[in-house]
Structures are given as C-alpha cells and as structure tokens.
Image (tube, rainbow, N blue to C red):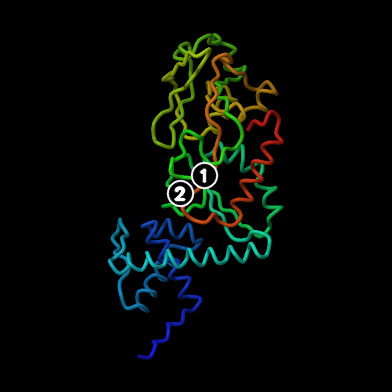
Amino acid sequence: MPVQPTARLSRNDLADLNAFRVVERLRSFTKAALELGVTTSALSHAIRNLETRLGVRLLNRTSRTVSPTDAGASLARRLNIGFQEIGEALEEISQIRGRPAGRLRLNVLSDGARLLIARHLPTFLYRYPEVEVEISVDDRMVDIVAEGFDAGIRFGGTVPEDLVAVKLGNALKWVAVASPTYLHHRPMPTTPDDLRAHACIQMRTGQGIIYKWEFERAGERRVIEVAGQVCVSETALAIELALAGAGIAYCLEARVAHHLRDGQLRVLLPDWSPTEPAMYLYYPGHRRIPQGLRELIDLLKEEIAKEPFNEI
C-alpha cells in the first residue's frame, strides 16, 4: 500500500498552530494575544483561518469563555508534544553553538523584580545578547506552567513543592519604617502592640488578603493586625507614602536601605525585626530547562554573592 505524502506546512500554518496552542492553554484570546504580542482581533482571525483550512472547529467561544472542542483538545495535546520536541531540538543546536539563544518568560514578585532583576538583568543581557527576556511583575501566586512561564521568583515559603527551587541569597529581614516627619508628633512604639495606635499603611497581598505584620524577638513571635487609613497593593507605593509622612510601612529592609542611610526613614522596633526565607527562582523539573535559564541562575547566584554580606 503506497505511503500517503505528509501534508506540507507553511510558515503561516506553524504560526497559527502555535497561536491555537497558546489560546487553548490560557483559555483566553486576550491573554494569548498578550503573550504572543499580537492584537486580539488578529489572533481571532488567525484561529478562524486555521479552522477553515482544517475543516473542523477547534474552539468553542462564548462572550465569557473559550474551551477546546474534542478535536481541539486532541490537536492541542499532539501539538504540545511536537512543539516541545522542536524546542529541545533548537536547544541542542544552541548548545552546539556554545551560547544560549531564544526567549525566557519570567513571573516575578515585585520585591524580586526590584532587588534581583533590576540590579542584575542588565549584566545578563550584556553577556547573552541572543536571549530575549519577558518579565511579568505580579504578586499573585501564579501557576507558571499553566500560564506559560519558564520560571518564577518568589519567597521560599511560597514556592510549590513539586517544582525545582534554587535559593537566591540569604534570609531576608523585614522592618517597620516611618519618616522623621511622621514620628515628630507621635510617640515612638516600644512594642509591636503599640502599632495599633499608629497610622499604618496596610498591604493587600497577591492572594487578596490584608497582610498581618510579623515581629520576633528572642523566640517570641507576634502577629499584629494593624489599622490604618490607607491600604495599598504594592510595596513601592507604601514606601513612597511612608517617605511622605503618611504612616508606617512594613517591607524588606533591602527595599529601603538607601532611605535608611540617608535618614529619610527610621526603623521602628529594630529588636523585633524578623528574618524570613530567602527568595527562590523556581521552574518545572519535568521538562528540559529552557535556553538561557541555567545561565541566568548562575549569574544571579554569582552577582548576589558579591553583594555586601550576601544580602539582597
């Protein structure tokens, strides 16, 4: 029996198949368009053209949801295997060339973005000019596999146990800080409970809850539900409000180190400042590590080790 010739794929076919794969994974045209760097309308048009060429509907669409048809789910499973093989083949070529190339997608919490990525990514980009890096700064706990990220950076206690985690630096110190202006007409707190009578800048975490401030001294641990007139969702704004005298902020000491040196902020309750787990870079271990990620890990560890007291 003669062997049927394999259908020849054009460049557009491959692009549209990859686009379909991303839409099916994210279950959203909007999110997929952002990841692919195209408009939502262009992406929708590409998928419809693909369905027309194949002669079968791949996605069920409503005004609120996107889900694969049986044919679409089957195709997506096969495509994921195929595109993974393509990626691994390209990585092998890159290794032969002796330098990484390609694109890395990272999901990083805001503290990691400011203390690690902003400091050290320029060195990485200079050293590996053929690697493109896309960074999503997000304090929500994101499923990096489902969202299509190659790696994430989070605090040690929040990294999922089924992922490979690489420690970056030492344990981190958390402090309550306020400006001299704020403290001028207010009593200096001497215990964590005194903060209940102060204007504290509350922080809503990526999980949607208002963070309770933690303090520790000589083995005694206190968790304080502070009160305040303002609640924010990012550390940078909390620090700026503290600098302006609007209240007391709670953050990593490293985020305000230069403000402390300049006297713009003061640490309150320094004997109660706790240390918490370091930041970790993490990635799925069930698949081949993406091009450039090993080099990024090595560079971050190398650069952090050079910092005073190996602190970030």
In the picture as drawn, the residue positioned furthest to the bottom comes out as 2
Above or below 154: residue 49 = below
Can you say which quadrant of the picture contains the N terminus?
bottom left
Query: Horizontal and vertical percent for residue 274?
Result: 53, 21
The residue type indicated by label 1 comes to Tyr
Name the image quarter holding residue 166.
top right
Q: Which residue is mark 1?
A: 282
For numbered disc 1, what is the local secondary structure? strand
| Quadrant holding the C terminus | top right
User: Looking at the picture, which amino acid does disc 2 mark?
Assistant: Ile
Please tell me which residue is depicted at 31% across the width and 60% down the height of the picture: 67
Q: Is residue 144 left or right of residue 312?
A: left
Q: Residue at x 47, y 57 (%)?
A: 34
Asked whether disc 2 touches disc 1, contact meaning CB atoms under 8 Å apart, the reply is: yes
- Residue displayed at 57% across by 25% down: 173
Q: How many marks?
A: 2
Determine whether 74 is above or below 297 in the image. below
Q: Position of residue 179 (x, y in %)?
A: 60, 20
The quadrant in which residue 63 appears is: bottom left
Q: Tell me the residue that label 2 is attached to.
A: 144
